[in-house]
Every structure is written in structure tokens, then in C-alpha cells.
């Protein structure tokens, strides 16, 4: 990890908002890291944390199978904030009483602040918070006082000021809690005494310095997909070691229109590195001939991609290091139990046994996606690449329903380019989370120039979402949709109909395959 002067530990007990809590802390320019509740106490002692936050979780503290922790964590002298399940756990650990309520609280709830001189509730009035619980604290532990309550929750918050232990039954990290940001800020600065000096500029300087020290005069090979993470990793490594970096870019012919050329031009013109582009669209089309099932397409594309990639890496490897665009969410271990450890992610790939490097470098492994984008901007990467939308690993291969052919790829690339151009021109681009075109395996009857046609249908998809766990279709104005449809039909050969996907997630997914 890069040198960080002050850190907050987010101890994960299986809550769905663990990453959001860490993000809220980092919004205050204080570094936060997430560890599962299984982390040893000695590791926490050695972490030199300014504060500890217990997350929520779906369990009851009285369930022997639920996540618990060593009570000694409350005796370390480090300020603690418990949230939801974390609040109940603090009560349980200190001898308070937690009971199942006659009626739970879910959603927006009004609370009243009972303590005018509470540091945690400084400048926070009676307000709306977001609750999600069935159990509740009925008796606070010795040494604690109630600092807030609601109609159905006698202990919406409690605190032990002498020991700097605080707990709230609600979720301050979600936007529905009216003064949630203020409460977390009070904990971070007024309780924990943080200064808030963790910034992206210092991250870049510290990372470049540590990379130079580690790499020395050795070489680094990075797999560059053209996505945000690998692109920012490449720029950061280039700043650190210049032409000692080799980027291997596999263009399988399933990218968006002109995207391969854009990636190559960007990195060869802006950064000092060796850029190796492998053009292999014909090989991929050959492997995909006759393949229709979406999972089979994913398997073929993934297998062929890594075959081509590792063959090129073998040619380029001269010892040194292998770099990956891993970011923080790829690394986090879940606090939900042994069965929910790290899942394999596209940013972390298994290296063939016959390829030997001195080690693996992951320069972005401490950053969330929005922080990665900020680093990219500071390093001079073009905005259209830094703010690139999510793009499936198999590329357009899973936006073409049925068999993939060269003609279908060209049709979809053109239609997708028109859609993206019109959205950008309309000024609503920032309102959409993701938007793209799909080529279903459907042909329809049409009339063009007084002649009957039987050509392809193009579907366009646009969604809005905060987290991609759920999504709603975007309410694009009709005049913009009309312009998109008119241009696609007139400018894209073999297309005579355009439809707009009005499906939310669930029941649908963002992608079609």
C-alpha cells in the first residue's frame, strides 16, 4: 500500500453498504480500507488506525452463527462507530440488551436527538434517517447514554464519550439519511481527530515514487484492454518507468467503432511506452463461426483472448514484472463468511506456469472506480476514455444476438456510433449511466424508396442507476429518439427498424446477453 498518514478501518460484518461507507469516508479526504470481521486483532492493532467503523449486517447478534468479534477491540483506545448490526454488536459486547422488536423499521424514519452536547450529533437536528432493522437495543450498556431515538426505536443512537465509542441504529452512509454525511464527518474529524490530507495528487506522487523504487531498471508488461482501469494503470506506470513499460493490446475486432485506433493513438502519442497491438479479428471470427449460445460465445472469446494475449506476453517478457489494472473492489474480501471470499475478476488473471516474472504490480489496488477516473484525469488521459462507459469483456460479441459475423459487427458498430454521437450532441449524456445499441437476430419488413425491404432491426438501450444492482430505463425525450432512429436507418446499411428497450433491472438485465 502507498504511504498513508491516517486511516479509518471499515470492519465488514456482511453489510450491503460496506463499500459505500468506505467511499463516504474517502469523500472527506481520509483513507479508508475494508477488512472482513475475520481479520485478527493483532493486525488491527498494527494498522495504526485513527478510527474503526463496524458495518451493518443481516444477522442477529444472538445467533451463534452470526459474525462476532473479540471484545478487546473496544479496549484499544481507538474511536469506534457501530452502524446498524454494528450498533447492536457493540451493545451485546458491552452487556447491553438487544431484543427483537414487535415491529421493525425499514425506510425513512424520523429521529429525535436527545443529547445537545454530543460530538457525533454536533449541528445535527431532529431529522430523517434510513433504517433497516428488526432487532433493536432495549437497554444500553453501562457507561453509555442514549443520544437519539425514534417512535419505535428507543435507542436510535448511543455513545460512551469517555471511551469514544459511538453507535447508530440507522445508516448514515446512504443519501436517504438527511444529515448522514455530517454525522460521518463529525466522527472522522471531531472524534477521530483526522486532518483530511489524503488526495489524488499525493497518491500519484507516492505511487510513482514507490513504483520506481520497486521496478528499478527492470521491465513491466501490462495487459491493456482499453478500459478505464488498465488505461489508468498504464498511464501511471508510464509516468514511473517510461519506455520500460510494454503494453499488450489485443484487438479482437469486437470493440466499438474506431476504438482500437483511438486507444493506440492515445497511448502512443501521450505516453512514453512500448505499445504492442495484436490485430486478430479474423481468428476470433473463425472461432466464433456457428456459435450461438451466449455463454458459449463468452467462453470462446475469453479462451481465445487469453491464448493470444499470453502468446504475445511470452514474446515480450524479459523477466521484470507483470502489471494488472486491479482496483479496490476487486480485492475486497467479503465479511459474509468463508463461502463469499474474493471471486475471480477480469482484472486479476491467472498466469500460465511457463511464464515467469519477478512479481505482480497492481498500482490501483487501493482505489475505487471514481478515484481511478480522477487519477486518469490528472495524468492527462482524454475524458472520453477516462469516463468510458462499462463495456462487457466479450465486447460486441454479447450485443449481437445469435451467430457473430463480420457484417453484423459492422452494422452494430455503425448503429452504436450514431446513437452515442446523438446522445453526446443532445447534452443529456451525463444523465445516463449506460447506453448502447444491440443487434438482435431479427429481420423485419420495411419500405424504403418505394421498395420492400427485409432488413435488420436495431435495439437501443439506455439506463440510469446508482450502483448497477438495479437500473431503470432512461426517459430519453422523443425528439432525441427520433433523431437517433432516423440517422441509424439512413446511415447504417441493412437496417430498416429501430426500437427502444423500456425494460428495467429487474426483471431484465442491463445487457441483453
Image (spheres, helix red, strand yellow):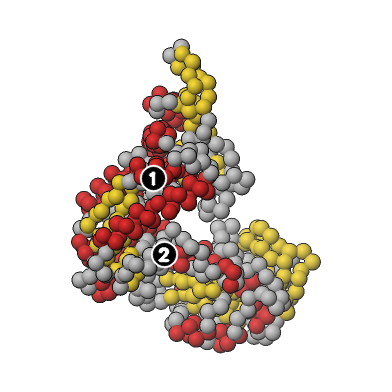
Between label 2 and label 1, give the one nearer the viewer: 1
Q: Residue 23 in the image: state x and y as whole percent.
A: 47, 64
Residue that appears at 53% across and 52% down: 468
As drawn, 403 above or below 248: above
Q: Residue 452 in the image: state x and y as whole percent.
A: 49, 15
In which image quadrant can residue 322 be found?
bottom left
Q: CA distance from mark 2 to mark 1?
A: 21 Å
The numbered disc on residue 284 is: 1
> For this rendering, which residue is in front, 8 or 217?
217
Label 1 crowding class (10 Å Cα cut-off): few <14, some 14-19, many 20+? Answer: some
Residue position marked by numbered label 2 in the rendering = 350
Residue that appears at 60% across and 72% down: 337
Please state if 471 lies on the left or on the right of 421 as rendered: right
Label 2 crowding class (10 Å Cα cut-off): few <14, some 14-19, many 20+? Answer: few
Q: Residue 326 in the image: state x and y as whole percent.
A: 40, 63
The numbered disc on residue 179 is: none
Residue that appears at 39% across and 52% down: 305
Instruction: Examine the rendering and report whether any part of residue 383 can be seen.
Output: no
Please state if 97 lies on the left or on the right of 473 as rendered: right
Amino acid at each position: 500500500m502507498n504511504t498513508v498518514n491516517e486511516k479509518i478501518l471499515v470492519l465488514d460484518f456482511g453489510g450491503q453498504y460496506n463499500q459505500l461507507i468506505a467511499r463516504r469516508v474517502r469523500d472527506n479526504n481520509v483513507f479508508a480500507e475494508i477488512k472482513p470481521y475475520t481479520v485478527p486483532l493483532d493486525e488491527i492493532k498494527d494498522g495504526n488506525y485513527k478510527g474503526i467503523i463496524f458495518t451493518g449486517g443481516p444477522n442477529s447478534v444472538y445467533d451463534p452463527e452470526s459474525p462476532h468479534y473479540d471484545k478487546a477491540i473496544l479496549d484499544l483506545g481507538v474511536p469506534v462507530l457501530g452502524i446498524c448490526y454494528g450498533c447492536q454488536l457493540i451493545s451485546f459486547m458491552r452487556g447491553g440488551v438487544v431484543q427483537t422488536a414487535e415491529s421493525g423499521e425499514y425506510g425513512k424514519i424520523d429521529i429525535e436527538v436527545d443529547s445537545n452536547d454530543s460530538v457525533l450529533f454536533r449541528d445535527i437536528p431532529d431529522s430523517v434517517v434510513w433504517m433497516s432493522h428488526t432487532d433493536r437495543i432495549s437497554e444500553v450498556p453501562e457507561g453509555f447514554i442514549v443520544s437519539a431515538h425514534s417512535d419505535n426505536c428507543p435507542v436510535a443512537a448511543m455513545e460512551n464519550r469517555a471511551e469514544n465509542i459511538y453507535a447508530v441504529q440507522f445508516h448514515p452512509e446512504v443519501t436517504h439519511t438527511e444529515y448522514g454525511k455530517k454525522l460521518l464527518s463529525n466522527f472522522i474529524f471531531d472524534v477521530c481527530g483526522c486532518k483530511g490530507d489524503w488526495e489524488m495528487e499525493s497518491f500519484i506522487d507516492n505511487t510513482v515514487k514507490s513504483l520506481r523504487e520497486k521496478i528499478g531498471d527492470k521491465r513491466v508488461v501490462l495487459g491493456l484492454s482499453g478500459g478505464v482501469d488498465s488505461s489508468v494503470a498504464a498511464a501511471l506506470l508510464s509516468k514511473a518507468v517510461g519506455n520500460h513499460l510494454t503494453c499488450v493490446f489485443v484487438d479482437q475486432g469486437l470493440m466499438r467503432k474506431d476504438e482500437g485506433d483511438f486507444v493506440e493513438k492515445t497511448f502512443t502519442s501521450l505516453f512514453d511506452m512500448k505499445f504492442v497491438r495484436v490485430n486478430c479479428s479474423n481468428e476470433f471470427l473463425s472461432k466464433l463461426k456457428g456459435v450461438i449460445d451466449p455463454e458459449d460465445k463468452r467462453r470462446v472469446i475469453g479462451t481465445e483472448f487469453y491464448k493470444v494475449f499470453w502468446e504475445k506476453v511470452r514474446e515480450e517478457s524479459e523477466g521484470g514484472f507483470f502489471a494488472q489494472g486491479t482496483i479496490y473492489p476487486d480485492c475486497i474480501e467479503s465479511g459474509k463468511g468463508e463461502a463469499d471470499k474474493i471471486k475471480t475478476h477480469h482484472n486479476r488473471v491467472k498466469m500460465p506456469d511457463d511464464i515467469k516474472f519477478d512479481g505482480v504490480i497492481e498500482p490501483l489496488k487501493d482505489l475505487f472506480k471514481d478515484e481511478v477516473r480522477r487519477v486518469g484525469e490528472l495524468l492527462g488521459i482524454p475524458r472520453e476514455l477516462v469516463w468510458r462507459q462499462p463495456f462487457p469483456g466479450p465486447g460486441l460479441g454479447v450485443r449481437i444476438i445469435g451467430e457473430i459475423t463480420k457484417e453484423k459487427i459492422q452494422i452494430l458498430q455503425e448503429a452504436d456510433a450514431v446513437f452515442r454521437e446523438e446522445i453526446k450532441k443532445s447534452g443529456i449524456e451525463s444523465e445516463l449511466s449506460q447506453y448502447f445499441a444491440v443487434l438482435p437476430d431479427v429481420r423485419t419488413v420495411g419500405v424504403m424508396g418505394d421498395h420492400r425491404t427485409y432488413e435488420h432491426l436495431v435495439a437501443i438501450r439506455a439506463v440510469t442507476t446508482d450502483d448497477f444492482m438495479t437500473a431503470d430505463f432512461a426517459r430519453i425525450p422523443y425528439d432525441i429518439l427520433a433523431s437517433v432512429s432516423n440517422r441509424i436507418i439512413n446511415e447504417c446499411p441493412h437496417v430498416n427498424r429501430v426500437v427502444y428497450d423500456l425494460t428495467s433491472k429487474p426483471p431484465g438485465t442491463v445487457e441483453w446477453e
